[in-house]
Image (cartoon, helix red, strand yellow):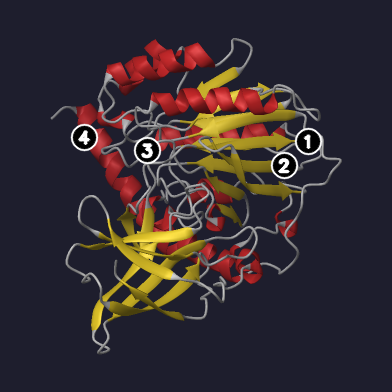
Amino acid sequence: MDMGTLIEIKNWIVGVVFGVFMVLTVVLPSQLAMIAGGRVTDIPVTPEDFVPEVRVVAFTDSHNRNDNVAAAVDTAYEMFDNDETYAGVDGFFTLGDFSSVGGEGDYENFAKTLSEHVRDDTVLINIHGNHEFKNDNYKEYFLKHFNQDPDTVTEINGFSFVAFSGERSMTEWTFTPSSLKWFDDALTEAQKKSGDKAVFVFQHPHAWGTVYGSTYWGDPQLNPIFNRHPGIVDFSGHSHFPMNDPRSIFQGKYTAIGCGAMATFETDKNLLPGHHPDGYDIAAQITVIEADSDGSVRIRGFDVFSGTCFCDYYIEDANDPSTFAYTYKNRKAHDEAPVFAKDMTASAHKNDGGEWILSFDEAQPAEGYIVHNYTVTIRDESGKKVFSDKFVDDYFVFDDDDTADFRLGADTLESGKTYKLTVRAESAYRRTATSQEIEFTAA
């Protein structure tokens, strides 16, 4: 084993030990304090006179779905080319995992798609994700096909945008200490010269314990860096957790946004990650970022397929954490239990594959919030329980369907028999609707 490998192993061990230390002594206590603390205040609304001085678009985790990438870029131009307040898109930032295993062909196809759809006068910045790190030639392929450094600081209209790919350490899940130092130093320099302007930051994984999905897929190596730079506005991916979940915005010492995904969604079920509910592959979310030089920032999430704007966040002063309204505590305070219609109905039929499909009228969440999951119990005429489970709602799919539809399995029900359904709806912050009981006859 050569000396370089020994040094790398030593650095990796030091990094892991340091990461565990930071989680136990800095990250976990500080994140729990952020969740518990904060004021309860009104959720901001974007002022009618807000006029941005810059607009960029970010998206992440396309995993070779270059058709979705093309649609995202085209959609952004269509939305803003003729915007009366501020026309155009100044830049696109892609946040990694454009590949599956990091093969050169994935770089080539992604770069080709971008070159065919991103205009020459629009800034384009790419970064690595962990899937690109699966291939040992990730640096070579990146420079060859993207014609930029993997770590960049870009100025657009006087605003600083720090994009961090980092370097793979011993695994695809860890960064080298030297690359993290570059990141820390870049943020320091950007904030020194930003004045009142917000500083925007992009990397692939979430900081641990911040946005929805980060406790499963976050990276604690980032937390001590971000905690040293209050006021930054950070954007990340990796988890594939949908952006329209209200927990995908976090504010503590800084602002963090989980940008969803462009290929497939993932959610948690019973607090366990890795769940892929029906409709999870209907995924193409983009993040539109606008800012004024006084520190105000507007962040919107759009569904590419339907053109729906599903969230609109306004931050009056991104540099002043004491004013932050999108804390966990404040977001939860404004959530309410979902509400079922009094005349709601339920039914069950078999699909072409022979599975029973249970359908019932959806519960309605509070404005700006979601129904995250339903707990379903079915009993037969004698009162015997024949089915019970929790289903994650397809809140990330935007269509005209106002029913919740879930697969039960081919042998769950019997045609012609009457059953009693008990259903409970739960919001993202675990606000629970009053349970509803409905009789239905299996078709």
Cα separation, mark 3 vs mark 2, equals 29 Å
Is residue 303 visible in the rendered image? The answer is yes
Residue indicated by mark 1: 292
286 is higher (above) or lower (below) than 390? above
Q: Position of residue 53 (x, y in %)?
A: 77, 29
Q: Secondary structure at mark 1?
A: loop
Amino acid, disc 1 = Asp
Amino acid, disc 4 = Leu
Which quadrant, please, contains the N terminus? top left
Occupied quadrant, residue 33: bottom right
Cα separation, mark 2 vs mark 1, equals 7 Å
- Front position among marks 4 and 3: 3
Residue indicated by mark 2: 297
- Front position among marks 1 and 4: 1
Is the residue marked by circle 1 packed among few (<14), some (14-19), or many (20+) residues within 10 Å? many
Q: Residue furthest left?
A: 1
Label 2–label 1 contact, CB within 8 A: yes
Q: Residue at x 41, y 75 (%)?
A: 423
Task: Specify the label residue 331 is tagged with.
Answer: none
Task: Specify the label residue 175 is tagged with.
Answer: 3
Q: Residue furthest right?
A: 49
